[in-house]
Amino acid sequence: MNVALFLPCYVDQLAPDVAWATLRVLERAGCQVDYDPDQGCCGQPFLNRGALREARALASRHLRCFAGAAAVVSPSSSCVATVRRRFGELGVSGAHESGPRTFELSEFLVRVLGKTQLGARFPYRVAMLQSCHGLRELGLGTPSERAGGELAPSPLESLLRAVEDLALVSVERPDECCGFGGAFSVTHPTLSARIGRARLRAMADAGAQYVTGTDASCLLHLDGIRRREGFGPRAIHLAEILANGASVPELAS
Amino acid sequence: MSERDDILARVRQGAPRRTRHPGLHPPPALPGGWDVFAAALAGVGGEAHGPYSPHALGGALKELVRRRAEGGRAVAEPSAAELAGRGPWETAREPATAHAFADVGVALVKGCAAAADCAAVAVTESDAPHRALPFLCQRLVLLLPVSLLAPDLHRAWALVPAAAARGHHVTWISGPSKTADIEQVLVYGAHGPLGLDVVGIAD
Amino acid sequence: MTTSFDQRALATLPSRGELAQHDAAVWNLRLRRDAAAAEVPDWEALRERAAALKAFTLDHLDELLIGFEEKARAAGAHVHWATDATALCRIVTELLSARGARRVVKSKSMLTEECGLNPHLEARGIEVIDTDLGERIVQLAEEKPSHLIVPAIHKTRREIGALFHRHMGTPEGEDDPERLTRFARADLRRRFLAADAGISGVNFAVAETGSIVIVSNEGNVDLGTSLPTLHIACLGIEKLVPALADLPVFLRLLARSATGQPISAYTSVLTGPRAGGELHIVLVDNGRSALLSNETQRGALACIRCGACLNTCPVYRRAGGHAYGSVIPGPIGSVLGPALGGAAGAELPHASTLCGSCSAVCPVKIDLHGQLLAWRGERYRPPPAERLLSLGAALALRWPVLRGLARAALRLLWPLLARRHSRNPAEAWLAARELPPLPKHSFRAQWKQRERGRE
């Protein structure tokens, strides 16, 4: 299957390993992956601040860039949520047509390709970070607020449970926000840190060695706190766990 | 144009009449019954008794009121007094100012409908003509014919007679008065009664 | 880029202990809501129904208001209309003065708080006693409520004990919640019995019958409105519901969402005045009709003031209600802020991570986080520095050439950005976090290199 890779700007600039891992995982799952280096930004940071003119311009450019793709996949649930849920509100032409073709990585693997087993091994205790956009905007799993009905496991959880020797730890308040919130992380740094610290503490209390999830932005924020405070699980993106295959990453200090 | 007309004109601009009334909510599938009601009542700090047959009711009530009144004054609203018969309580007379009930230990009032899942009992104006009485008393005793107990609030709502529903008041009472405003510690008897007993009356 | 909300959060919950205590106490209410909702087999369907009922109400609000007024008057109540806070205060003052009422008992009404009624009356020599225990506590402390349902959640028993000792003569050092409540019970009972008038809020106003519905756990609403002969009920115009039979939908959602109880201890449906009494209903606009015309924001008028969004909000729990500087804190306060919340209200939509938990718990399904995002676009007025940065960044992201330049600049500046300094634009990030190391090349550059290698 042909897939166009859609990378958040911060993954491109700050976490290229996540991009390479995403590429490898998609190829291992049997996809032909195309990457257009001219792609820009979906416009989320601008939309998040209310800069609608810039957001619209970037959204139009994004749609033009990915116009021909049969499926667009991104290692970021918040970027995908912006395309699927917010482009329409921005009134950008072609928004509704591109929406359903854009998927977050775990969602694509499990719900589109029907694959959970990718031959990965990761012998550590891992906490899941259920990113808010993925959970509540894209429906990647059942949020804890929902009453009644079974709690369907998220694609993230399904994939992690299929990883050899990986022990998923259960954390209190499993889907509480990590406190990143985009611009919020720098406009409200005290609160952003308070919320993030609390998540790290809960994961540490649950015995997690690693924290993983679908959004590198949340993970960078938590890992930044970990490196400052000196406690808490190390962050690693889902794609990096799945891409490891038989190799084991070093637990560098 | 009056203030009223100004407000309505502005509201009219923002009220485009696009949606339809969604209709009545279908009642949920809940078991109901006296045991469910009693458990729910206990959960909100009240206590259920009986149900008693009409013969046994009088004796049970006398015992309960003696226990709850602790030597204080007991007053029954007329429709409750009719059910309860004679006992260590006076019947509330007309006319009486609300303040005349400030020293009441136990009040007896009849309920006209109840919902089992939330232990709420409806008290209407005709059964509680002295509106302040169920709130001024130290302990409240509600009399409830079990035939008026519905599994849920929707069905209980429909049991309140239409005329009563348009009377001055219908108050749904679930448990005694309570508060948790001080460090979230639950305390019964904030301003209203310290305790609530619901006495069931079998057919 | 630090905003004053963040600073106020630090001032409201300054120590780790206070922060942890506030967060835990409020989260506890969210857990109780979860447990209560789990016991309602049709919970999600009920939310849908409630949302639809409120949508219908708002769409037909003028008709319903006229219907309500007609039925209320037919039942013997007086109905007044107040355009704004000033009008409400004027109407209430006139009603009280005309009857020589000088001692008033009041039950919870965020609307009267919004309109500044208490200070207005007190300035005219009218004593107003808030009778909800939590409201009474903050009244004695001369503070604003910090939570919709538990107004004194920020106060410890020791602080409350000291307050009661000073104002009610409780023994010094007494801080047992039950004993303190008993003292308040006795004190407020005297006031109920001596009051000339009772003022209350209204939870729901029924158009079909002209009834007002008021709920409480303490019984203070009923005492305050059945003992004095004059009852003044104040409500925002959005508080209508179409018919009596619609009430169970809201009642089954309200208390469970607020505190996890199946229903409030007392739910009173009042139609017309009681025998020998007077009922005056005041319908208040104060910006609501304008909000109704705002297509994106009018959904906020469906709010039934349960407080569930506060309890689940990671920001509210770690900032505290007083950080908001508005009458109503939390997500709904932030949604109403730009329309009804004055100067402090304008920046509240940015005090959120947009996690969406609020929308997921709202019993009437208000798209709270969606509305916060919409306000940011509607009221976009950034400082010039941010405007420039935003334009520059957008350009760089659209033009590959500029992107390359920006990357080169980032490579040069990164070591400086990682160092803590008050002039460092990255200081807000660095206050509590390390910057990640900057990889030598972006993915884009690595990809291009790989492609060149393959050719």
Image (cartoon, coloured by chain):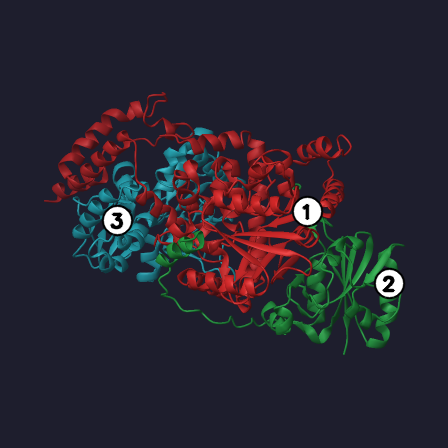
A116 vs B86, nearest the viewer: B86
Q: Nearer the viewer, mark 1 or mark 3?
A: 1
Q: Residues within 10 Å of mark 1 (few under 14, many from 20)?
A: many
B59 vs A151, nearest the viewer: B59
Q: Where residue C220 sits in the image (x, y, percent)?
A: 67, 50
- Left or right: A63 with respect to C359? left
Rendered hue of chain C is red
Which residue corresponds to mark 2?
B89
Q: Which chain is green?
A: B
Q: Residues within 10 Å of mark 3 (few under 14, many from 20)?
A: many
How far apart marks 1 and 3 lie (CA) works out to 76 Å
**Residue found farthest to the left:** C455
Residue B160 visible in the shown view: no
How far apart marks 3 and 2 lie (CA) works out to 83 Å
How far apart marks 1 and 2 lie (CA) works out to 31 Å
Which residue corresponds to mark 3?
A23
Q: Chain of mark 2?
A: B
Q: Amino acid at mark 2?
A: Trp
Question: Quadrant location of the N terminus of chain A?
Answer: bottom left
- Vertical side of B123 occupied by A16: above or below: above
Q: Amino acid at mark 3?
A: Leu
- Left or right: A50 with respect to C242? left
Secondary structure found at label 1? loop
Q: Nearer the viewer, mark 1 or mark 2?
A: 1
Mark number for residue C107? none
Q: Nearer the viewer, mark 3 or mark 2?
A: 2
Q: Where residue A180 sits in the image (x, y, percent)?
A: 39, 39
Q: Where residue C102 sits in the image (x, y, percent)?
A: 66, 41
Which residue corresponds to mark 1?
C196
- Vertical side of C441 occupied by B118: above or below: below
Q: Where residue C219 sits in the image (x, y, percent)?
A: 68, 53
Secondary structure found at label 2? loop
